Image: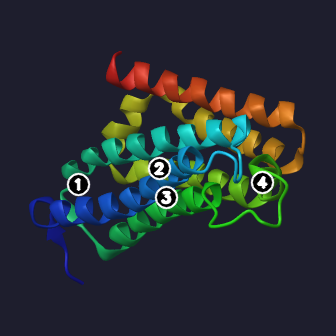
Amino acid sequence: MDHFSAAEVFPHIRILLGTVIGLGLTRLLMKLAGFVQHPDKNPPSLLHLLWVGSLIIELVLFWWWQLALVRIETWTFGVTIFLVTYAMMLFFLCALLSPDSIAEYDSYEHYFLSRRKWFFGFFAAVAVLDVIDTLIKGPERFERMGPSYLAQPLGGILVCILGWNSRSRAVHLTIVCVHYVYQLFLVSRYFYG
């Protein structure tokens, strides 16, 4: 089996991951532009817009944190497939938030709530993938994240189970607001701490 150094592989991996993340951002931004272009066709909902904004932040954070991959000394095809799968899971979340049509639904909120099991299923999977991604980056990365790190994906999975099971607008607005607080915590802790 071939193993490649980070210097040989890392630029190619970043391009591939950036392409998948870029496609997800494009879908979300096109959906937002569609609301401006055709405001009366399918008006946005607050819940849907909050998730779109949160996922845009999630994509940027994922892209940024992949810079730590430069420290991997030896690349394997398995690690590459894992990272591409992780990026594709994020893309799928974007695709769920930016459907081609919602003709069979009353609104974007109705669409989101009816697709919530898919959305939160993929979101829970992303929480698990994040732990594996951190381990791939090495034990020093895991230590840098601190002992509270493992509570984050476990808490995320519990929140996903709540979102999976609830049709309550109030519950879903709370979940997305909690996710924004979590993202602000990550940004303040790891970029300004």
Alpha carbon of mark 4 to alpha carbon of mark 2: how far? 21 Å
Residue drawn 51% across the image and 56% down it: 90
**Disc 4 vs disc 3: which is toward the camera?**
3
**Residue contact between numbered discs 1 and 4, judged by CB atoms under 8 Å:** no
Q: Earlier in the sequence, mark 1 or mark 4?
A: 1
Type of amino acid at the residue the image marks with label 3: Arg
**Disc 4 vs disc 2: which is toward the camera?**
2
Residue with the mark numbered 3: 27
Residue with the mark numbered 1: 72
**Residue contact between numbered discs 4 and 2, judged by CB atoms under 8 Å:** no
Type of amino acid at the residue the image marks with label 4: Arg
Residue 3, position in %: x, y? 19, 74
Answer with left or right where residue 145 lies relative to residue 137. Answer: right
Alpha carbon of mark 3 to alpha carbon of mark 1: how far? 31 Å
Q: Earlier in the sequence, mark 2 or mark 1?
A: 2
| Residue closest to the eye, 146 or 45 | 45
| Scheme by which the image is coloured | rainbow
- Mark 1 closeness class: few <14, some 14–19, many ≥20 residues within 10 Å: some
Secondary structure found at label 4: helix
Residue with the mark numbered 4: 116
Alpha carbon of mark 4 to alpha carbon of mark 3: how far? 18 Å
**Disc 2 vs disc 1: which is toward the camera?**
2
Quarter-of-image position of residue 117 = bottom right
Residue drawn 68% across the image and 34% down it: 176
Residue with the mark numbered 2: 29
